[in-house]
């Protein structure tokens, strides 16, 4: 029978609940258990696909095309658990189902209410992941205990233990223990209040995971245990990490969380195997090299807007024993200050996905800088589209080339709407979404990186390379190194007369893991390292030739 872990959060948001769930999933997997993960988001949007990255951070896309919360990215980076549309539900999606049923007449004349109809739908969503061969389902409840919109979810998970037996459910509450410098003390009161709210609803947490800046003293842990009615050994410290988020699972092991969960849920588990993960942490802590990569975007100030990009860069760095320093650049800054000033000294340039007009010229300028200076360039989605526009304008000399996303009447629409997108007016879930195959050109840089001629990558876009310009581009030296299997959609472009200039229409960042960096990111960082070495040698040669210039 599948066991269930429910993870709630208290005191403040952004405590790293997603990371904690991913870490728990990973530890249970590495104890030989088959795990599933899922997240409930109490907001009304049906999915985060229609939300601005400023509101919500990155939209994470799954193979099946579901547009989901970025915590699912953590789940995929830490575990092997298969993820699908069933792994992320919002209030909007739950209500949508209930309302559809009501319109269909499924409730047979009854009054439709939050309890039991909405809570039944939430429980069905939890149950959809359980079943044959699944040992544990971990369900993360988004938001913070005390939020009005979270109540139906908490009520549903309370009922869940009644339905399947308390011995089959575990409630974990993640909380904050703030340290007050003025008082020289860690404060437990917010946690007491938060657990109090949970208990009012009828949920007694079994385990408290306490986020702290400093070590949690024994007396503090004992006080929390007493006031919150949990066992002392079930008050688990999760201290801020110095180097990397990938330290979280290890710190939880050090506090015996895996043992406690296995015992409390009476799971048949194997001894923990994390030797490879410990090696990974060693590599993260002691890199041999360092490169600086510029990431030019529109939502740079929101530190979660390009989450998977930053993670994938880190993974590629780990693979090359390299610390990747990211220079985060607002595209508009390039428009104001010029690419030379803002991007000087970078060893590689990455332009991630994006939407809309703001900053687009800064991105196009950045591509020009990388192309002309031989700086390794990696364009992703809108990044590819910018590279196409830049090439059209500055190499093919189609001076008024653009994407119709921004200038629908431009003379040279080198990037334009996909045919199937023309008649779509609804915004939610209507882009080209999810995993599609891509055929790779033998001998290309893409081929060198992937080591394969057929790959699957995830997509999230409406606009596309305009094939009418393909011949003209190729005649000017651009190579199309990846297409859809029918050859109709351009998926990857590159410039063979450049050290490493590769742009993709897909989002490879969603398929990178710390122990298995994405091949294109690996290729990009290798090229950035090579570029840095070349520049370093040149500087050295120059200084040898002109010794006086050294002073
Ligand atoms: N806005 C572009 C499109 O819709 C690019 C999307 C993206 O970068 N994810 O095609």
Image (spheres, rainbow, N blue to C red):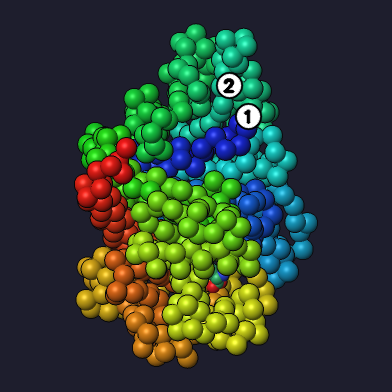
Q: Horizontal and vertical percent for residue 532?
A: 29, 52
Task: Check contact, mark 1 vs mark 2: CB within 8 A.
Answer: yes
Q: Residue at x 37, y 75 (%)?
A: 493
Q: Is residue 284 left or right of residue 82?
A: left
Of the pair 352 and 435, the residue shown nearer to us:
352
Of the pair 18 and 228, the residue shown nearer to us:
18
Quarter containing ligand 1? bottom right
Question: Residue farthest to the front?
Answer: 548
In this picture, is 531 found above or below 180? below
Which residue has dot 1 on it?
11
Report how many numbered discs are placed on residues in the image.
2
Can residue 364 be seen at all in this image of the molecule?
A: yes
Q: Residue at x 29, y 66 (%)?
A: 499
Q: Horizontal and vertical percent for residue 442?
A: 23, 78
Q: CA distance from mark 1 to mark 2?
A: 10 Å
Q: Quadrant of residue 349?
A: bottom left
Which residue has dot 2 on it?
178
In this picture, is 129 found above or below 487? above
């Amino acid at each position: 029978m599948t066991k269930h872990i429910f993870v709630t959060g208290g005191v403040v948001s952004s405590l790293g609940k997603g990371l904690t769930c991913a870490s728990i999933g990973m530890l249970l997997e590495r104890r030989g258990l088959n795990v599933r993960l899922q997240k409930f988001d109490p907001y009304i949007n049906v999915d985060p696909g229609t939300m601005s990255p400023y509101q919500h951070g990155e939209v994470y896309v799954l193979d099946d095309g579901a547009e989901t919360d970025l915590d699912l990215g953590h789940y995929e980076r830490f575990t092997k658990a298969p993820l699908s549309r069933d792994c992320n539900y919002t209030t909007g999606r739950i209500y949508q189902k209930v309302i559809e049923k009501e319109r269909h007449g499924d409730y047979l004349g009854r009054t439709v209410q939050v309890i039991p109809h909405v809570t039944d739908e939430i429980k069905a969503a939890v149950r959809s992941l359980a079943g044959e061969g699944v040992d544990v389902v971990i369900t993360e409840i988004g938001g913070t205990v005390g939020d009005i919109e979270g109540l139906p979810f908490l009520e549903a998970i309370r009922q869940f233990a009644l339905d399947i037996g308390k011995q089959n459910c575990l409630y974990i509450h993640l909380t904050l223990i703030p340290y007050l410098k003025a008082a020289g003390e860690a404060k437990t009161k917010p946690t007491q209040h938060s657990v109090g709210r949970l208990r009012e609803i009828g949920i007694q947490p079994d385990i408290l995971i306490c986020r702290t800046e400093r070590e949690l003293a024994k007396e503090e842990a004992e006080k929390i245990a007493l006031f919150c009615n949990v066992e002392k050994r079930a008050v688990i410290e999760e201290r801020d990490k110095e180097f990397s988020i990938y330290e979280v699972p290890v710190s939880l092991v050090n506090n015996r969380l895996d043992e406690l969960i296995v015992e409390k849920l009476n799971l048949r588990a194997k001894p923990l195997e994390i030797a490879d993960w410990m090696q990974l942490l060693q590599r993260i802590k002691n890199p041999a090299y360092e490169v600086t990569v510029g990431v030019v975007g529109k939502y740079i100030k929101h530190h979660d807007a390009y989450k998977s990009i930053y993670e994938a860069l880190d993974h590629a760095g780990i693979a090359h024993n390299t610390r990747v320093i990211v220079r985060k650049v607002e595209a508009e800054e390039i428009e104001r200050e010029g690419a030379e000033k803002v991007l000087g000294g970078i060893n590689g340039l990455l332009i991630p996905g994006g939407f809309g007009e703001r900053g687009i010229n800064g991105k196009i300028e950045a591509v020009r800088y990388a192309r002309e200076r031989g700086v390794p360039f990696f364009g992703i989605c809108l990044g590819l589209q910018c590279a196409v526009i830049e090439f059209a304008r500055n190499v093919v000399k189609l001076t008024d080339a653009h994407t119709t996303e921004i200038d629908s009447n431009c003379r040279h629409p080198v990037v334009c709407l996909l045919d199937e997108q023309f008649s779509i007016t609804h915004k939610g879930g209507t882009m080209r979404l999810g995993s599609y195959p891509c055929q790779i050109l033998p001998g290309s840089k893409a081929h060198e990186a992937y080591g394969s001629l057929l790959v699957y990558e995830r997509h999230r876009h409406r606009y596309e390379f305009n094939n009418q310009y393909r011949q003209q581009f190729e005649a000017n030296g651009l190579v199309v190194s990846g297409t859809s299997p029918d050859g109709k959609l351009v998926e990857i472009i590159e410039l063979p007369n450049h050290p490493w200039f590769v742009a993709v229409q897909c989002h490879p960042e969603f398929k990178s893991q710390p122990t298995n960096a994405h091949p294109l990111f690996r290729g990009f960082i290798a090229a950035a390292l090579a570029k840095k070495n070349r520049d370093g040698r040149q500087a050295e040669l120059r200084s040898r030739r002109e010794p006086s210039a050294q002073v």
